[in-house]
């Protein structure tokens, strides 16, 4: 279902965690800073509302969305993080640069997730224009930073449940 069909920021706004010791990294692109700052604000506030302790939220800014994967890897190497959320905005523009950047970033984050066995969340807006970006960073379609935070928490929860399931002995 597309963003224009529903505002997922409000659909999933009641998620909370039991583990107060979770550590979350947030990597934010400086490019399109008005958009990415709004994504970051929504993401961080959502994590706090879910019960993450502010001192357990680590944040770095990188020059652009293309640098998000390396920023995420560096942040993950410095702190024992449970998930890393990457926030950016690549507006289409006149050339196809957006396709190259978006594909590279999404592929790199997926590789990091699989290699490190933890969520590296793709919270990068890929709009056709600035208006669409604003609509998705606190506008009429919600804030995708909030959704990225919920994705990270849900994937951490899934990982913990799967680890617990492996430790059980016997039949269902």
Image: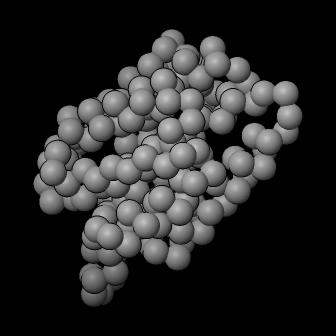
Residue lying at the far bottom in this picture: please name it.
169
Q: Residue furthest right?
A: 95
Decide which of 130, 171 is in the foreground and name it. 130
Q: Is residue 144 left or right of residue 18?
A: right
Return the residue nearer the eye: 68 or 4.
68
Instruction: Give the quadrant of residue 128.
Output: top right
Image quadrant containing the N terminus:
top right
Q: Look at 57% across and 54% down and name the residue there.
A: 67
Q: Which residue shows up at 38% across the image and 63% down it?
A: 75
Q: Tell me if 121 is positioned left or right of 97 in this view.
A: left
How are the colours assigned in the image? one colour
Residue 153 appears in the figure: no
Q: Residue at x 17, y 45 (%)?
A: 54
In this view of the protein, can residue 35 be seen by the observer? yes
Q: Position of residue 15 (x, y in %)?
A: 28, 39
Residue 129 picture quarter:
top right
- In the rendering, at what x and y percent does residue 48 appear? 21, 39
Q: Count the marks: how many?
A: 0
In the rendered image, the residue lying farthest to the front is: 63
Give the residue at x 80% y 42%: 97
Q: Position of residue 108 (x, y in %)?
A: 62, 63
Task: Measuring from the top left, give residue 123's x and y in whole percent.
Answer: 52, 42
In the rendered view, would you say 150 is above or below 22? above
Q: Quadrant of residue 119?
A: bottom left
Quadrant of the image for the C terminus?
bottom left
Which one is nearer the viewer's eye here, 35 or 147? Answer: 35
Residue 151 is left or right of residue 58, and the answer is: right
**Side (left or right) of 129 relative to 110:** right
């Amino acid at each position: 279902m597309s963003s224009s069909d529903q505002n997922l920021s409000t659909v999933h706004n009641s998620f909370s965690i039991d583990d107060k010791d979770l550590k979350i990294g947030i990597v934010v692109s400086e490019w399109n800073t008005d958009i990415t700052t709004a994504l970051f604000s929504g993401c961080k506030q959502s994590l706090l509302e879910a019960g993450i302790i502010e001192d357990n939220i680590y944040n770095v800014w990188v020059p652009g969305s293309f640098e998000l994967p390396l920023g995420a890897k560096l942040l993950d190497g410095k702190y024992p993080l449970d998930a890393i959320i990457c926030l950016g905005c690549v507006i289409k523009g006149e050339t196809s640069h957006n396709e190259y950047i978006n594909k590279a970033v999404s592929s790199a984050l997926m590789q990091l997730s699989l290699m490190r066995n933890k969520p590296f969340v793709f919270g990068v807006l890929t709009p056709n224009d600035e208006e669409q970006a604003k609509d998705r960073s606190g506008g009429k379609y919600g804030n995708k930073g909030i959704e990225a935070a919920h994705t990270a928490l849900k994937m951490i929860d899934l990982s913990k449940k799967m680890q617990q399931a492996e430790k059980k002995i016997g039949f269902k």
